[in-house]
Image (cartoon, helix red, strand yellow):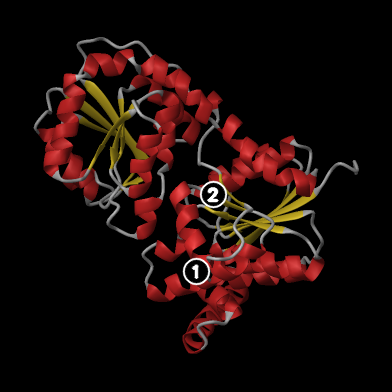
Amino acid sequence: MNPATKEVLLLTSTNLACNPRCLKELRMLREKGHRVTLAAFELHNWTTDKEKMLREELAGVEFHYLDAGRHPLMPWLKATVMEQVSRRLSSLAPSDLWLAAMSINKRSWMLLQWVKQHRKKYDLIIAHNPPAFYAADWLANATGSPFAIDIEDYHPGEGSGPFQSRCATLLMRRLLPKAAYVSFASPLIKEYSQRLVNPGRTDHWVVVNNTFSRTEFAAPAPVDAAEPVRLIWFSQYINYGRGLEQMLPVLDEFRDRVRLTLVGSGREPFVSKETAGREYVRVLDAMPQAVVHRSLSNYDVGLAIEDGSADINKDICISNKIWSYLLSGLYIVSSDTKGQLRFMEEHPGNGVCSSLRADDLRKAIVHLLDHTAAIREGRAGRYDQGASAAWENESAILAAQWKPILG
């Protein structure tokens, strides 16, 4: 092995298809010539084929997949029993870190058993998702390896109930200060997390935004000035609770002047109740990220509407799609969650913010219709400006954290 080559372990409670941040890190580490081991989960869902393709693409990575299903039965049964017992005991001992970790999810137990069975010193361990945090800390303590944590969401505020919130808070409060570095997916997630450990050490905490490679986006395509305003919204699922049910009745008022494309796996009864009969709405099946990103060049406006009232995390996070719109040069209609309001303030001229109230949404649509020509004329300039936010630049923040650890 080349002396400059380092060994890195990535731990996630999902898989690469479900965890793009983990995938980006893995690709970066390989590009820098390091040896990477991944411990993840076989989820037996829509990600199965995608995960297989990723494994084939990422030659040289050492993959270890734990089964999230009931086959084989005994590991799943043990993990389920441990989760349930831990939850009952954690209520009696709320400050016990081990009990809190095992209560978060049965995959915490499964990952902990895996690192115990595959005990090895790594140059760096990186944990994604709360069920991976304790396993990373245990292996770091057992082998003297440094570990890092990636925080993509504000886990104490994800709306899963007070018990889960307490467990997530304890994990973050106790483990984040011990990490070699902590990366966050938005400035507000970092700020809210700092409150948990105040006055603990946070100088090693950095924001690494969820941006994408510039190569995935095409320059804006020509458009006929007579075409209706072309709006797009995409996500993994098309369903209630995403702001669409508030937006569609408003768009009905302008049905002859707008076209809306929804991309994702349609959920019932939303699709049949909310999109059927609306001729200006087109629904497309979910498609690979790169395909969606390439298609954005054919639109005028990207909808980044989120219901921030659902929980704290939704209010302070920055949706992945808003970065996609920025990089593609689309004009953005963003909901006024705390996270996205700050985003729009930091990227002036790229769109407008609105609450989900009908009157405010109506004003936003009228603004689009009144300024359609200018919005289209500005696409090329916004596309060029967006390059500065691409992953090729953002990844330098992560590389700077690795340098003193991995060289």
Q: Position of residue 299 (x, y in %)?
A: 32, 23
Q: Which residue is mark 1?
A: 168
- Mark 2: which amino acid? Asn
Q: Is residue 2 visible?
A: yes
Secondary structure under badge 2?
A: loop
Q: Is residue 283 left or right of residue 15?
A: left
Query: Are the two marked residues, 2 and 1, in contact with CB atoms closer than 8 angstroms?
Result: no
Observer-nearest of 44 and 136 = 136
- Image quadrant in which the N terminus is located: top right
Secondary structure under badge 1?
A: helix
Q: Position of residue 217 (x, y in %)?
A: 48, 24
Q: Is residue 253 above or below residue 140?
A: above
- Image quadrant in which the C terminus is located: top right
Look at 51% across and 41% down and name the residue there. Answer: 209
Q: Which residue is mark 2?
A: 19
Q: Quadrant of residue 250?
A: top left
Report crowding for label 1: few under 14, some 14 to 19, many 20 or more residues within 10 A (C-alpha): many
Looking at the image, the residue that sits furthest to the front is 199
